[in-house]
Image: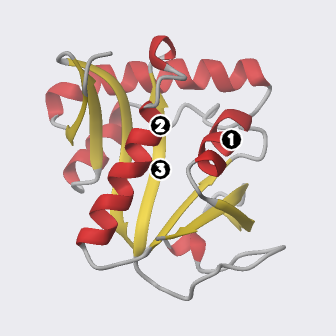
Amino acid sequence: MAELTIRDAVAEDIPQMARLYDLARAAMRAMGTDQWQDGSPNGETALTDIRQGIARVVEREGLVIAAAAVYVGHEPTYDTIYNGAWLSDDQIYGIIHRIAIDPMCKRQGVGSFIMDYCAGITRTAGYTVLRCDTHAGNAPMRAALEKNGYACRGVIRLLSGSERVAYEELL
């Protein structure tokens, strides 16, 4: 299997990123979850992430096969957790949002590759905590997080008020 690479996304990647988000949205709809069914993330989200320096794309043989927002920072929606607790009180940590993988490349380690990348940039920045969240009905993402060492820690609320299952891993 060809090697995976990850890089910062650029404006020219937006159409492919938007396509990946659309494919992920359709898969979530087929699972019966309302995650991403409001039309976001989309090309505008990708542009915002690029401008903020957090957008990444994964390539195989020069083709973009996945997109995600991956960074080290602070997520305000993680400040309060319900029905559980964070393992760490750290205010800076590695974060992954908006993972979208081409359906033809699922179950090929792409999600794990992105999570390993996040762990690497987090360690390099001098931090030891990783956090992520997903919809309770997003079984594939929940399984991927658990497979990669993340533990379910409780529930957080997005700015919209929607609830998400919160995960954390200590490096």
Asked if labels 2 and 3 touch by Cβ distance under 8 angstroms, the answer is no
Can you name the residue that lies furthest to the right here? 83
**Colour logic:** secondary structure
The tag earlier along the polypeptide, 1 or 3, is 3
Is residue 89 depicted above or below 77 in this figure? below
Would residue 7 be visible to someone looking at this image? yes
Disc 3 marks which amino acid? His
Locate residue 97 relative to residue 37 in the image: left or right. left
Question: Residue 94, how many percent across, how many down?
Answer: 40, 66
- Expressed as whole percent of the image width and height from the top left, the position of residue 64 reads 27, 22
- Badge 3 is on which residue? 97
- Which circle marks residue 143 in the picture? 1
From the viewer's perspective, tell me whether residue 10 is left or right of residue 1. left
Q: Residue furthest bottom?
A: 89
Q: Tell me the residue at 61%/59% (across/down).
A: 150
* Number of other residues with Cα within 10 Å of mark 3, as a class: few under 14, some 14 to 19, many 20 or more: some
Who is closer to the viewer here, 59 or 39? 59
Q: Nearer the viewer, mark 1 or mark 3?
A: 1
Q: Residue furthest front?
A: 1
Residue depicted at x 22% and y 27%: 13
Count neighbours of disc 1 (C-alpha within 10 A) and say few if under 14, some if 14 to 19, many if 20 or more: few
Q: Sequence-wise, which precedes: disc 3 or disc 2?
A: 3
Q: How many marks?
A: 3
Q: Secondary structure at mark 3?
A: strand
Check residue 111 in the rendering and tell me which mark sits there, or answer none.
2
The answer to whether one can see residue 155 in this image is no
- The answer to which image quadrant residue 95 occupies is bottom left
**Distance Cα–Cα, label 1 vs label 3:** 16 Å
Mark 2 belongs to which amino acid? Answer: Gly
Left or right of 113, for residue 129: right
